[in-house]
Every structure is written in C-alpha cells, then in structure tokens.
Amino acid sequence: MQIRPLAVPGAFEVTPVPWADDRGVFLELYRHERLAEAVGHSLDLRQANMSVSARGVVRGIHYADVPPSQAKYVTAAHGAVIDYVVDLRVGSPTFGRWDSVLLDTVDRRAIYLAEGLGHAFVALEDLSTVVYMVSEVYNPSGEHGVTPLDPEIALDLPFAADELRLSPKDLEAPSLADAAARGLLPSWEASLALYRELDGATA
C-alpha cells in the first residue's frame, strides 16, 4: 500500500497493491496502522455510507462543523468517479485550493480527508458506487455545503455544465466567499486544535 499526501494538507491518496491470479484479485483496501502513520492518528470509524450515482452526478462540496466534523476514507466499489478534496478551513495556507483523485475499479485507490476539509465527486459512469467510511455519525445540524460550481474554487469538472446533475441542495449551496462571510466555514485554528487532540489521543 502506498500513501501519498495531496496538495491540500490533511488529505492523502491511498493506492493498494493488488494480488491477481486466474480467480480474480485480492487487495488490502484499508490498513489502520499505515494510515495512522501518515496522518498522525488512527481513524476511529463510526459509520459507513454508500452512494450509487448516474453518469454526470455531482455530490458535494460537503463538510461538517469542527469540532467534531468527519474524517473520511472514500473509495469506489463499482464504476469510476473523480473525487475532490477542497480546503475550506479559513486561515489555512491552502484555503480554497483543491486536489483530486480518480477512484475506479482499475487501480482501486482510496482518498483520506481530514476533518474540516470539503469533499465532492463526479460520477464518470452509470452506477458508480462510492463507499465512505467516516469518523463520526451523521449529524444533519452540523452538515453544510459549498457549491461545486463556484468559479472561485474552479473545480476541473469532467463534463459540460448541461451534463452535470446536482441535487437542489447542492445547487443552492453558497459560494466559498458567501460561506466565509456568513461564518459557516471551519477555521484553520480549530482544525489544528482538533488534529493535535487526536494525535495526542493516539500517542
């Protein structure tokens, strides 16, 4: 398993090593100690989610209040998606910056996102199935969104605007600037404090 830091601090690409024979393929999708070594603390899994999306569906940009927020470990069980991590932490040196990873059934990569980061993906194929393992149970009052169509963030989306399919909630989500002005975004300081607390709990 190879773990590579992404351009946004607190996000990592995970590439497993497949073992193939005439029966099929076996791989280690998740290793808690390897991820903890890269991140600085263990991922305390509290909930697992799955979504199935048609080609062109966009989900996100979603994030949760810090604390406690949600760390996420995401992979594609079927189909293919481009998965995006967006730095929404006000005061972060990479605030507003994003990176992406192709999640598919060829390389079987996963992506890890720390608490406070924004998450989105675009399905490249029908029936693209994404599995999310998260560190906190769903709390609707603490969940928020920023529009993935925000020109300030400027995600490199794989389809033209008329081919994208968004939920009404995601379409109506505020821009990055609006969310920041309204005090809806997590802060870099609060995020760092949470990471230090989690690092100390693991030490």
Image (cartoon, rainbow, N blue to C red):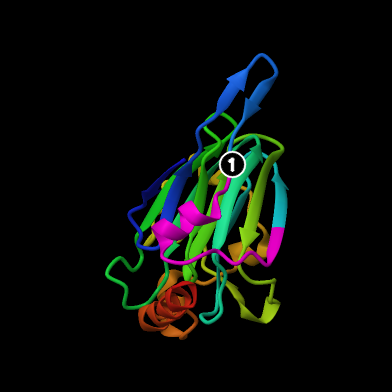
Residue at the extreme front of the image, as rendered: 203
- Relative vertical location of residue 139 with respect to residue 101 in this rendering, above or below: below
Whole-percent x and y of residue 128? 67, 39
Indicate the position of residue 71 as horizontal and vertical percent values: 54, 66
| Residue 131 image position (x, y, % from top left) | 66, 50
What residue is drawn where x is 68% and y is 77%?
139
Q: Amino acid at mark 1?
A: Glu
Determine the residue positioned at 56% across, 60% down.
Answer: 72
Say whether residue 122 is left or right of residue 191: right
In the picture, the quarter occupied by the C terminus is: bottom left
* Res 159 visible: no
The quarter of the picture where residue 152 lies is bottom left
Magenta-highlighted residues? 29-48
**Is residue 87 a member of the stretch shown in magenta?**
no
Rendered view: 186 above or below 55? below
Residue 186 location, x and y as percent? 45, 79
Work out whether 106 lies above or below 91: above
Badge 1 density bin: few <14, some 14–19, many ≥20, Cα 10 Å? few
Viewer-side residue, 27 vs 112: 27
Query: To which residue does mark 1 refer?
Result: 163
Q: Residue at x 68, y 67 (%)?
A: 46
Q: Is 36 in the magenta?
A: yes
Q: Residue furthest left?
A: 93
Q: Secondary structure at mark 1?
A: helix
